[in-house]
Amino acid sequence: MTDVTPVPEMTAPRRPWYVSALLAAVGVTLLLLAAWGYARWQSPYPFYGTAYRGAAAVPLSGTAQDGQPYTFTPGTGGQTTALFFGFTHCATICPLTLSYLNKVRQALPEEQRRNFQVLFVSIDPARDTPARLGEYVSYFGSGTGLRVPEPALGTAARAYGVGYQKADVQGAEYQMNHTTATYLIDAAGRVRVLWDYTQLPEVPRVLADVQYVMEHP
């Protein structure tokens, strides 16, 4: 009978912890560089908001705050437009958005200010009458409130990637859950930048985005 000497099992040497940490850091760095590169591909200008590659904005028709028919036709009149979908019973997001957009507008030089408008589209046409929209928008400065009836409102909102839904509140009137983005549309009628409402308090940075778009339609 032949003796067989067992061969020791070979195991891979354990990777030092600092090598794993270094590889993880490299992976994160590559991911961030890829995100940065994609953002720069979207736009060579380092926008504070999220850059868009010039998607055509969708027209909106309804009743303005003065009770008259109103159609927003992107790319006409040389206007740059900050477009926001909200409602007048909104507790925080809508008031903050309109307030900061007005600060941005007031910070523009007079000539640019004449070509910059804020358009507030109600996602709650059942309660937001033109008169109520007028009082609400004018409280926060200069802007246009627009009431668009359903189903046209839903169609337009989807075209902009805006979602909204009625939410029942116990012991109170219903509220509306909705997308909190503001869309910046240039004078050629293209969506150029999107800001979340949490970004708007950085007025100088938002202002820089607006001025770049106004100067480079």
Image (spheres, rainbow, N blue to C red):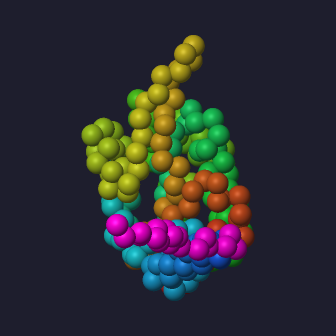
Whether residue 108 is visible:
no
97 to the left or right of 153: right
Residue sitting at x 43%, y 30%: 166
- Residue at image point 51% right, 86% down: 44
Q: In x, y percent, where is residue 53?
A: 40, 76
Q: Is residue 73 above or below residue 15?
A: above
State the residue in front, 94 or 20. 20
Q: Position of residue 61 (x, y in %)?
A: 33, 51
**Picture coordinates of residue 206 (x, y %)?**
64, 68
The residue under the point 55% across, 16% down is 170
Picture quarter with the N terminus: bottom left
Give the mark count: 0
Q: Position of residue 160 (x, y in %)?
A: 37, 57
Mark yes or no: residue 6 visible. Answer: yes
Most extreme residue toward the top is 171
Q: Where, by quadrant of the figure, is residue 199 drawn?
A: bottom right
Give the magenta range.
Answer: 1-18
- Rendered residue at 55%/83% (across/down): 45
Q: In screen coordinates, is 51 left or right of 208?
A: left
Residue in the foreground of this view, choosing between 8 and 159: 8
Q: In terms of secondary structure, what is the magenta stretch mainly?
A: loop
Q: Is residue 115 above or below residue 157?
A: below
Q: Is residue 29 above or below residue 70?
A: below
Task: Please tell me whether residue 158 is drawn above or below residue 53 in the rendered image.
Answer: above
Find out whether residue 14 is within the magenta segment.
yes
